[in-house]
Image: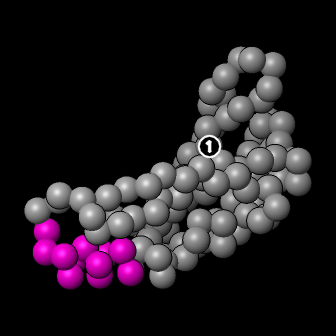
């Protein structure tokens, strides 16, 4: 693991659809001592030729809601602890420093 990743190698993009709407997958790599900042990445990508404006872009993220009713071979108290820690983690919008009014969350219910 690296504490810091050189800026020339830590981001890239590729188009995902050719339906007339620009839809891209952006991959950014950070070292464990760096904090993620999506607006900065988008500025760097715009300088490299990606046509993007953060205030007209939507960000799609997944969110999972967990319950301890599944048949996973784990003690119930461990399942409940995992669910508790998961609910108290930072949300992705804050972690990546995204504008909250531009984020679309897609939900999924998971039984563990």
Q: Quadrant of the N terminus?
A: bottom left
Q: Position of residue 61 (x, y in %)?
A: 60, 52
Residue drawn at 73 percent across, 56 percent down: 103
Against 12, is 66 above or below? Answer: below
In this view of the protein, which residue sits in the foreground, 12 or 6?
Answer: 12
Tell me which corner region of the image, top left, top right, bottom left or bottom right, holds residue 26: top right
Quadrant in which residue 92 is drawn: bottom right
Q: Residue at x 17, y 59 (%)?
A: 72
Please name the predominant secondary structure of the magenta segment in the image.
Answer: helix
* Residue 61 in view (yes/no): yes
Residue 84 placed where, x, y %?
38, 81
Q: Residue at x 27, y 64 (%)?
A: 69
Task: Say if 107 sits above or below 82 in the image.
Answer: above
Viewer-nearest residue: 90 or 70: 70
Residue 69 shown left or right of residue 108 in the figure = left
Along the horizontal axis of the image, is 28 left or right of 101?
A: left
Q: Name the residue nearer the viewer: 73 or 47.
A: 73
Looking at the picture, how far across and down is residue 60, in whole percent? Answer: 65, 48
Looking at the rendering, in which quadrant would you find the C terminus? bottom left
Q: Which residue is mark 1?
A: 26
What's the magenta region? 74-84
């Amino acid at each position: 693991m690296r504490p810091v990743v050189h800026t020339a190698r830590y981001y890239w993009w590729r188009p995902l659809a050719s339906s007339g709407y620009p839809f891209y997958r952006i991959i950014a790599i950070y070292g464990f001592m760096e904090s993620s900042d999506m607006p900065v990445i988008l500025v760097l990508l715009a300088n490299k030729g990606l046509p993007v404006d953060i205030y007209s872009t939507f960000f799609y993220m997944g969110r999972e809601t967990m319950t301890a009713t599944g048949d996973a071979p784990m003690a119930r108290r461990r399942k409940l602890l995992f669910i508790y820690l998961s609910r108290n983690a930072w949300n992705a919008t804050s972690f990546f420093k995204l504008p909250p009014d531009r984020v679309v969350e897609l939900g999924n219910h998971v039984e563990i």
